[in-house]
Image: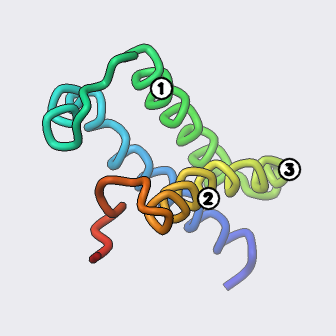
């Protein structure tokens, strides 16, 4: 399999995964406050994060359609995915995250 075909699949799957994970957050603000208190006190930051993260999923879909053309966007796109994931791992390891991320077992 050639590199552009692999990139097409990887970035399209990453975009789809991001949409599936992020879209439900628009309806979960209250539940997050109940399940992991304290409640969200600045909803503008919460919804701002979700909106920006969803916008980045569009970038993943664009790269998935034409990876050769959008190759310069691959590095910032990967950093977008790693930024959150690494932060959660570090916070959880430092006992600053209340719940493990993505089904990790404690």
Instruction: Please tell me how crowded label 1 is: few (under 14), some (14-19), or many (20+) other residues with Cα within 10 Å.
Output: some
Looking at the figure, which quarter contains the N terminus? Answer: bottom right
Res. 62 mark: none
The answer for how far apart the CA atoms under marks 1 and 2 are is: 18 Å
Q: Are marks 1 and 2 in contact (CB under 8 Å)?
A: no
Q: For the point 21% across and 32% down, which residue is it?
A: 33
Is 1 above or below relative to 9?
A: below
Q: Residue at x 75, y 55 (%)?
A: 74
**What residue would you read off at disc 1?**
51
Question: Which labelled disc corresponds to residue 82?
Answer: 2
Q: Secondary structure at mark 1?
A: helix
Along the line of sight, the residue nearer the viewer: 99 or 20: 99
Q: CA distance from mark 1 to mark 3?
A: 23 Å
At label 3, counting other C-alpha atoms closer than 10 Å, the crowd grade (few under 14, some 14-19, many 20 or more) is few
Residue at the spot of label 3: 72
Q: Earlier in the sequence, mark 3 or mark 2?
A: 3
Q: Position of residue 72 (x, y in %)?
A: 85, 50
Looking at the image, residue 52 lies above or below residue 14 = above
Dot placed on the residue nearer the N-terminal end, 1 or 3? 1
The residue positioned 82% from the left and 54% from the top of the image is 71
Q: Earlier in the sequence, mark 1 or mark 2?
A: 1
Q: How packed is label 2: few (under 14 Cα within 10 Å), some, or many (20 or more)?
A: few
Which quarter shows the C terminus? bottom left
Q: Position of residue 91 (x, y in %)?
A: 50, 57
Indicate the quadrant where residue 31 lies. top left
State the scheme by which the image is colored. Answer: rainbow
* Secondary element type, mark 3: helix
The local secondary structure at tag 2 comes to: helix
> In the image, residue 51 lies at what x, y percent?
47, 26
**Circles 3 and 2: CB atoms closer than 8 Å:** no
């Amino acid at each position: 399999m050639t590199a552009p075909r692999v990139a097409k699949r990887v970035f399209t799957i990453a975009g789809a995964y991001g949409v599936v994970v992020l879209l439900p957050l628009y309806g979960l603000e209250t539940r997050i406050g109940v399940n992991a208190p304290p409640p969200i006190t600045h909803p503008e930051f919460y919804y701002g994060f979700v909106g920006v993260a969803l916008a980045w999923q569009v970038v993943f879909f664009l790269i998935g359609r034409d990876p050769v053309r959008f190759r310069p966007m691959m590095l910032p796109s990967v950093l977008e995915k790693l930024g959150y994931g690494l932060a959660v791992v570090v916070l959880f390891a430092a006992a600053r995250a209340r719940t493990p991320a993505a089904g990790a077992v404690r």
